[in-house]
Image (tube, rainbow, N blue to C red):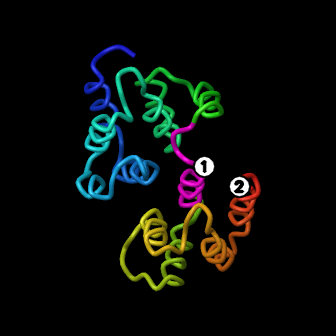
Amino acid sequence: MNGNIQEVLLDISENITTEEKDAMIFLCEGKITAHDTENISYARQLFHCLHKRGHITQEDLSLLKELLYRIRRIDLLTNKLKTTKEQMERDLKQRAHISLYRVQLYNISLELSTKQIEDLKFLLKLNRNISMLEILLKMEREGSLSQTSLGKLKDLLTHLNRLDLVKKIEAVEKNHK
């Protein structure tokens, strides 16, 4: 990659939506602190934080590439970082920065309809306007969701008649045993 890393990060950040920034923050759990997340309003602030913590460097952009791949911004991955989807798939078989658990939760959030998310809020007695990723984070903070405790999420998905997602969770659980 040519050029100053700050210029590249700014260029990419200008093409990231608020929802995509929130998704990247969710996927970066454990790499940045809760205090950091409170102060991140824009993608460039997230990138700055990851750069400051050594997760993104001029020599190693693998986390940034993985984030773009996970949020399905292949256009930015290809045009700004000169990395193809196929290259990323090969690289991720060797080394992934983001846990499979985190990726799975993110993918589940993408597969639920607006109505299903509203139904989930009803089941959890949540009245406020929060995203699916925020629901998952709240469940983690309350201790009802973790990498080793997916039962409540599976129960909720069963109530929503999303047995396809329950099966995906069970497949990942089986591979981790």
Q: Is residue 136 left or right of residue 165?
A: left
Kind of element beneath mark 1: helix
Circle 1 crowding by C-alpha within 10 Å: few under 14, some 14–19, many from 20:
few
Examine the image and state in which quarter residue 101 appears.
Answer: bottom right
Residue 118 locus on image (x, y percent):
49, 76
Kind of element beneath mark 2: helix
Residue 144 locus on image (x, y percent):
53, 74
Q: Is residue 4 left or right of residue 19?
A: left
Examine the image and state in which quarter residue 55 appears.
Answer: top left
> What span is colored magenta in the figure?
96-110
Type of amino acid under label 1: Leu
Q: Is residue 78 left or right of residue 155?
A: left
Examine the image and state in which quarter residue 34 appears.
Answer: bottom left
**Eyeballing the image, is 52 above or below 2?**
below
Q: Foreground residue, 53 or 43?
A: 53
Instruction: State whether the magenta stretch is mostly helix, strand or loop.
Output: helix
Quadrant for the N terminus, please.
top left
Residue 81 locus on image (x, y percent):
43, 24
> Does the residue at mark 1 contact the one at mark 2 (Cβ under 8 Å)?
yes
Image disc number at residue 100 = 1
Type of amino acid under label 2: Val
Residue 103 locus on image (x, y percent):
56, 50
Tell me, yes or no, whether the highlighted magenta stretch contains residue 108.
yes
**Tag 2 residue:** 172
Tell me, yes or no, whether the highlighted magenta stretch contains residue 142.
no
Q: Residue at x 63, y 68 (%)?
A: 150
Q: Residue at x 33, y 39 (%)?
A: 50
